[in-house]
């Protein structure tokens, strides 16, 4: 049911096909996993097909090794009229032990769309805990920063750089 589950975790093993030339899982594979978890979370929250509008602040904190169990957690931290901001944490570690280390973190913005591909309203998420209120406020601050960065980046697009 839309508007009830705001968090989702995907779990799987990192495979040899995910490795880069340095022997660690490559960033592109991690970004794919982030997008998959973000879609599943946003679709679950909105009850609609969703598209990725933005991925930002991606921090690769620690490498992931082949054979690690990987947990990609997506959580709604802000809702607009048709968009959802998701905090994404990727954790990984030896599957034989309980510990999982943070390997990657970022924010995704997903937009719900209708059958014609047009933005579609999503249920509002209202934070209740202190932590959730801070997450929402952080998402709002990040929106303001993205607007400034977007204006600055416009020069690059305009100048063809």
Image (cartoon, rainbow, N blue to C red):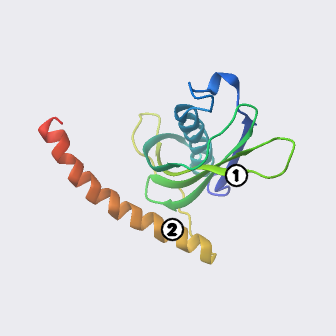
In this rendering, position of residue 140 left or right of residue 40: left
Q: CA distance from mark 2 to mark 1?
A: 24 Å
Residue 41 disc label: none
Q: Residue at x 86, y 47 (%)?
A: 97
**Above or below 33: residue 122:** below
Quick one: SS at disc 1?
A: strand
In this rendering, position of residue 146 left or right of residue 55: left
In this rendering, position of residue 44 left or right of residue 154: right
- Residue highlighted by disc 1: 101
Please provide percent x and percent y for residue 68. 75, 37
- Residue highlighted by disc 2: 136
In the rendered image, the residue lying farthest to the left is 159
Q: Residue at x 54, y 58 (%)?
A: 123
Please provide percent x and percent y for residue 132. 59, 70
> Along the line of sight, which residue is nearer the eye, 51 or 31?
31
Q: Residue at x 41, y 45 (%)?
A: 119
**Above or below 26: residue 38:** below
Q: Residue at x 44, y 59 (%)?
A: 80
In the rendered image, the residue lying farthest to the bottom is 130
Where is residue 87, by image quadrant?
A: bottom right
Quadrant the C terminus occupies: top left
Where is residue 131, by image quadrant?
A: bottom right
């Amino acid at each position: 049911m839309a508007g009830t589950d705001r968090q989702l975790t995907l779990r799987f093993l990192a495979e040899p096909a995910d490795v880069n030339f340095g022997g660690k899982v490559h960033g592109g594979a991690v970004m794919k996993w982030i997008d998959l978890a973000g879609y599943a979370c946003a679709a679950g929250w909105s009850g609609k097909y969703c598209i990725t509008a933005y991925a930002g602040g991606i921090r690769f904190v620690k490498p992931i090794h082949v054979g690690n169990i990987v947990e990609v957690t997506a959580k709604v931290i802000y809702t607009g009229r048709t968009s959802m901001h998701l905090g994404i944490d990727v954790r990984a570690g030896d599957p034989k032990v309980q510990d999982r280390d943070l390997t990657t973190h970022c924010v995704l913005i997903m937009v719900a769309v209708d059958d014609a591909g047009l933005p579609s309203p999503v249920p509002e998420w209202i934070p209740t805990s202190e932590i959730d209120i801070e997450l929402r406020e952080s998402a709002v601050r990040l929106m303001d920063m993205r607007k400034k960065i977007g204006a600055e980046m416009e020069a690059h697009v305009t100048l063809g750089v």
